[in-house]
Amino acid sequence: MATAARSIDTQSQAEIPHPEAVVVRFAGDSGDGMQLTGGQFTLSSALAGNDFATFPDFPAEIRAPQGTLFGVSAFQINFGASEIDTAGDAPDVLVAMNPAALKTNVKDLKPGGLIIADDGEFNARNLAKAQYDANPLEDDSLGKWQLVHFNISQLTMDAVKPFGLGNKEALRCKNMWTLGLALWMFDRDREPIIQWLKDKFAKSPILADANIAALNAGHAYGETAEIGNPGAVSIPRKHVDAAPADPGLYRTINGADAAAMGLVAGCQLAGVKMFFGGYPITPASSILHALARFKEYGVTTFQAEDEIAAIASAIGASYAGQLGVTSSSGPGIALKTEAIGLAVMTELPLVIINSQRGGPSTGLPTKTEQSDLYQAVYGRNGDTPLPVIAARSPSDVFDCAIEAVRIATQFMTPVILLTDGYIANAAEPWKVPDMSSYKPFPVSFLDHVPEGGFKPYGRDNKLARPWVKPGTPGLLHRIGGIEKEGDTRHLNYSPANHQAMTDIRKGKVDGIAAHIPDQDVCLGTEGGKLAVVGWGSTFGPIHQAVRRMRAKGHDVSHIHVRHIWPMPGNLGDLLKSYDKVIVPEMNTGQFKTVLRDQYLIDAKPLNKVSGQPFRIAEIEAAIEEALA
């Protein structure tokens, strides 16, 4: 083992975090198993009772060339003994499995932070791939950080040698060696990981034993090398206490699993079966995978041949009396647009989930963005209004999915639920809710000819038309994309009829505002000098930034909007009660434009379109500038 302890100035020392929260980033080649390592370290954090938030960050290529800068895969976790809302601005510890991982991630490390590097991978070939002229482990280029480096690759091979694995298979165990070291550093129990390995490799006991040996070897290395000794490096071994939590059943959840469970729960509350028509696309594919496990709850999953077939099959299911659901990302939603218009015209319930990613076109398939808001609110031909809901965190997707099902079935309309790549892949602790606390909203199918005759486009007090299952005696009717007459099923192209039907469809969606909660203030007061208004996954960094600025005495509040369209009825008056409004979002200012349009307020944008979430510090700086 080689160590390098650097002198840290007073300012840099002040930036080292309070021990109640620690940010660790694992980074390596896309074949090094960093997502697996991070996932299992997350499991250990959950079992230790820490609050946490994660940020998986991986390359778009299925298998990028080994050792290259664009092939680096990383997993960041922020865990602590207090409330955690984000995956952390900058790591305290960076585990770099090769030169490329070091080069692409070290600039994010806090001054005085700890680098753990596998110097067995810092050979001439890998250094050249990472565009290093000299070995950074041997010069002074890493001087503002603490550095520990040793040959993890060789240590792993030595640990698994008794199991007779080839070099390639043996090196696949080095992520477990690294995990074992991390478990030692943060005083974590290995037993749950050992049991997981036994279950994972139940059909290959040799692989299970080899990975367990690597895990134990990494843990033992931490004990014997004493890298936690303050005399060796500046950051000692840490024990992070459990975070306070309400009694209850908790589990780790990501946005994709929360979406699947929320849809199932929503359909149970509505009393309908679900049909999911999907087509694989990053990062939305996981929702299809998750829903396929819920067949016992009346869920049918169908992987179609393309995006258009996926949504068309879902619309057909809604016509047949089940709730049609489909999901995609921005490019796939674009392909579904014509069919979304058909669902609006036929006034059938449909839930559409958009897991946003960087665009346009193929864009950044594995990175996060919020640039599909215009697409969701406005992006269809004709006047095609529909409700839009945005989830703010992985666990929040559960409730948002239920809300989407409620609105779709109660108002006979398609609904778009916006998440993004960060929400879909990130994980956090979730207190499993008591479903008896959710109010059912059972659907009512029209099953008889009403007095006065059947009117397929007759309306209830919410302007919703009746939902009729095909084959119901006396209720034969036609639907389709061509304009229909107001009360009958007949085609009608007349100007007056089209005006009336367009107004009715718009009025129905606008009227949903009376059936959603008023907008609240997440943190701060109603009225004041500054409101920071967010939507979607910007919640965590905005909330933490506002909390810090309020602690410094600044008059700033946080408002986070779930119902993007229609917006809550009190939102306009609430925003006008502040002197200034800024809107951080991961696009070029889309929600800011919607707020200006609807309420004539001078909302100022704070935009980031890098494929990465906001940092708390970026929003703090914007608040300071706005209040200056």
Image (cartoon, rainbow, N blue to C red):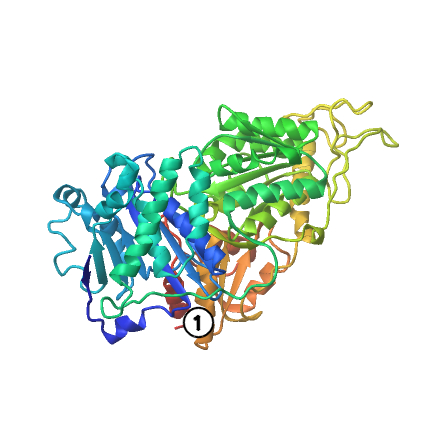
Q: Quadrant of the N terminus?
A: bottom left
Is 620 left, or right, of 347 in this rendering?
Answer: left
**Residue at numbered disc 1:** 549
- Residue furthest front in the image: 162
| Rendered residue at 47%/69% (across/down) | 547
- Residue furthest right in the image: 451
Q: Nearer the viewer, residue 56 or 167?
A: 167
Q: Secondary structure at mark 1?
A: helix
Indicate the quadrant where residue 80 lies.
Answer: bottom left
Q: Nearer the viewer, residue 494 or 89?
A: 89
Is 150 left, or right, of 425 in this rendering?
Answer: left
Q: Nearer the viewer, residue 304 or 590?
A: 304
Q: In x, y percent, where is residue 580?
A: 48, 67
Q: In x, y percent, where is residue 475?
A: 79, 25
Indicate the quadrant where residue 121 lies.
Answer: top left
**Above or below 317: residue 270:** below
Q: Does the rendering let one see residue 420?
A: yes
**Above or below 231: residue 499:** above
Q: Does the rendering let one see residue 387?
A: no
Mark 1: give few (<14), some (14-19) or many (20+) Cα within 10 Å.
Answer: some
| Rendered residue at 46%/38% (across/down) | 329
Q: Quadrant of the C terminus?
A: bottom left
**Above or below 10: residue 87:** above
Is 566 left, or right, of 73 in this rendering?
Answer: right
| Rendered residue at 56%/70% (across/down) | 527
Q: In x, y percent, where is residue 150?
A: 21, 53
Q: In x, y percent, where is residue 72?
A: 29, 44
Q: Nearer the viewer, residue 449 or 572?
A: 449
Q: Amino acid at mark 1?
A: Met
How many numbered badges does the structure rendering display?
1
